[in-house]
Structures are given as structure tokens and as C-alpha cells.
Image (cartoon, rainbow, N blue to C red):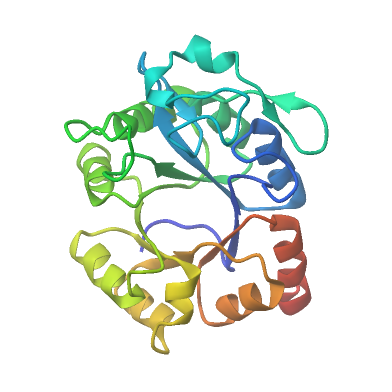
């Protein structure tokens, strides 16, 4: 298995403490770490001037006060946009380097590469976000475990080509059977398989054991229900992504004492 220093199921803060603060902001990341999340998941896209930034959607309109594609904006244009935090105040769209600086030495980074064929900013010719992510990890001297994940198999294949020391994970949605995702991820030599929670719950018994026998690890997204999350941990899942890390961490403490 890839190096993974955690002895228990890890709570992954999905886009930070996104149940309480605006997703993919430095404030949400800091809150998740303060709550005790061992890992933070976030999304990477590219600006028109080649800067890696942290934002989920291809279009900025859902999460900011602006509109338009991230890929059509410069970093300076993105910097002018504001994100309502949810508890008062506002934040900006972070760069990847800023996000890594917040997490370094404090939490693992689960970095999702956004370059998907169904989206309007898809670049079929180059995995620029992968290249920028690997460069940023080096330039920031990031300290801690890292996973490079994507729904796009070409993105994580490119990561393995450029930086085979970095663990990669295949994300699959609820329409993909968990065992099918495992078979593909294993064939491509990825360290992690990351099925949607609906697919994982619908998998035949013993899925986590099959993953471990293959020398891999399994994470899942998204579980905000404490009973469900604890059940996943009991089943052998290595990481559970949640929008509400404080709630799920409390459930893990009640169930496992840690």
C-alpha cells in the first residue's frame, strides 16, 4: 500500500468545513483542521493565465458574486470576486499554493483535479492542472500525505507519469459499481479507489477487504450521517469524506474512542 500514516479511518473534510463555512475557502480549511479533520479535500482548476486555483465549478456563479468560466478569467479577475462565508464576512478564491500553505504540516491534502470531458472548460490536449499541482507541491515544500484524485482517468494517469511517488485515487459516481471502479483502479496501479457512498453501500459484502487484498485503500464520498459514517468505518473503509467533519469526528470518538 502507499504510505498512509493513519491507523484509523480518516475523516476527510470535503471542501473544508463546508457545512458551516463557504466551500473551498481558506477559512473552511482552517476550521476543518481546528475541528480535528486529518485530511482536507479540495478542487483545482486553471485560470486563463495558467494559475492553479481552488474552486469546484467550472463557472464561478454558484459560489461567488461573479459569473463566467474560471478558465476564461485571469487570476487578477478572480481575485476581485467575493465568496460569502456563511457565518458573516467574505473570502476570496484561493490559489492552490495558498491552500497548500494552510494545510502543510497540519492535514493531508486530497487534491481533486477538475478536467472532465462533460464540462465546458475541458482541455483534451493537456492535463495542465495536474502539472501545476505537482509543481505547487514541490515549490511549497508541502509536508504531509497527499492524494491526487479525479473522475478523469487521464488526469491521474498523467500524475502517475510525472510523479509516481504521489498516491492517486480514482473517483467514481453512484452510477459506477464499486467493484468495477476497483478493477479499473487496480489495473491502472492507483493506490486508492474512491466510489460514491451510494455505490459503496450497494456493493457486495467484503468490498473493503477486496480492496485491501489488492494492496489498495478505499475512501468514499459523501457521508454526513453519523450512523452511516460509523458503519462505513466498521466495514473497513480507510477514509470517509464529509461536509460536516465536526459531527462525523464526534461520532468516530463515540464509536472508537479516537
Q: Quick check: 118 left or right of 194?
A: left
**Residue 190: % across, % down:** 28, 58
State whether residue 226 is above or below residue 78.
below
Q: Is residue 12 visible?
A: yes
Residue at the (72%, 52%) spot, across then down:
36
Residue that extends furthest to the bottom in the rendered view of this protein: 205
Residue furthest out toward the right: 88
Residue 115 placed where, x, y %? Answer: 32, 39
Does 184 sit above or below residue 112?
Answer: below
Toward the viewer: 134 or 165? 134
Residue placed furthest toward the top: 76
Left or right: 55 with respect to 178?
Answer: right
The answer to which of 71 and 230 lies nearer the viewer is 71
In the rendered image of this protein, does residue 126 appear above or below residue 204?
A: above
Q: Quadrant of the N terminus?
A: bottom left
**Is 200 placed left or right of 181 in the picture?**
right
Q: Is residue 20 left or right of residue 240?
A: right
Q: Using the rendered image of the protein, determine whether residue 258 is visible from the camera's viewpoint.
A: no
Residue 71: horizontal and vertical position, in percent?
Answer: 38, 24
Instruction: Please tell me which residue is depicted at 44% across the width and 75% down the height of the picture.
Output: 200
The quarter of the image holding the C terminus is bottom right
Amino acid at each position: 500500500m502507499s504510505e498512509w500514516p493513519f491507523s484509523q479511518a480518516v475523516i476527510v473534510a470535503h471542501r473544508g468545513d463546508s457545512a458551516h463555512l463557504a466551500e473551498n475557502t481558506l477559512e473552511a480549511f482552517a476550521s476543518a483542521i481546528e475541528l480535528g479533520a486529518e485530511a482536507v479535500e479540495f478542487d483545482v482548476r486553471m485560470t486563463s493565465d495558467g494559475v492553479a486555483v481552488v474552486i469546484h465549478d467550472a463557472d464561478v456563479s454558484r459560489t461567488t458574486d461573479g459569473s463566467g468560466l474560471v478558465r476564461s478569467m485571469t487570476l487578477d479577475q478572480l481575485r476581485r470576486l467575493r465568496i460569502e462565508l456563511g457565518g458573516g464576512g467574505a473570502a476570496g478564491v484561493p490559489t492552490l499554493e495558498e491552500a497548500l500553505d494552510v494545510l502543510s504540516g497540519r492535514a493531508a491534502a486530497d487534491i481533486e483535479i477538475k478536467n472532465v470531458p462533460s464540462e465546458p472548460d475541458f482541455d483534451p490536449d493537456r492535463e495542465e492542472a495536474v502539472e501545476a499541482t505537482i509543481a505547487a507541491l514541490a515549490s511549497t515544500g508541502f509536508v504531509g500525505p497527499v492524494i491526487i484524485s479525479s473522475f478523469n482517468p487521464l488526469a491521474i494517469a498523467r500524475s502517475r507519469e510525472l510523479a509516481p511517488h504521489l498516491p492517486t485515487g480514482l473517483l467514481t459516481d453512484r452510477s459506477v459499481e464499486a467493484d468495477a471502479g476497483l478493477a479499473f483502479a487496480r489495473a491502472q496501479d492507483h493506490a486508492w479507489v474512491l466510489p460514491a457512498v451510494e455505490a459503496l453501500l450497494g456493493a457486495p459484502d467484503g468490498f473493503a477487504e477486496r480492496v485491501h487484498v489488492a494492496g489498495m485503500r478505499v475512501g468514499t464520498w459523501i457521508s454526513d450521517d453519523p450512523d452511516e459514517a460509523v458503519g462505513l468505518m466498521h466495514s473497513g473503509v480507510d477514509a470517509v469524506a464529509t461536509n460536516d467533519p465536526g459531527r462525523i469526528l464526534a461520532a468516530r470518538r463515540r464509536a472508537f474512542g479516537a
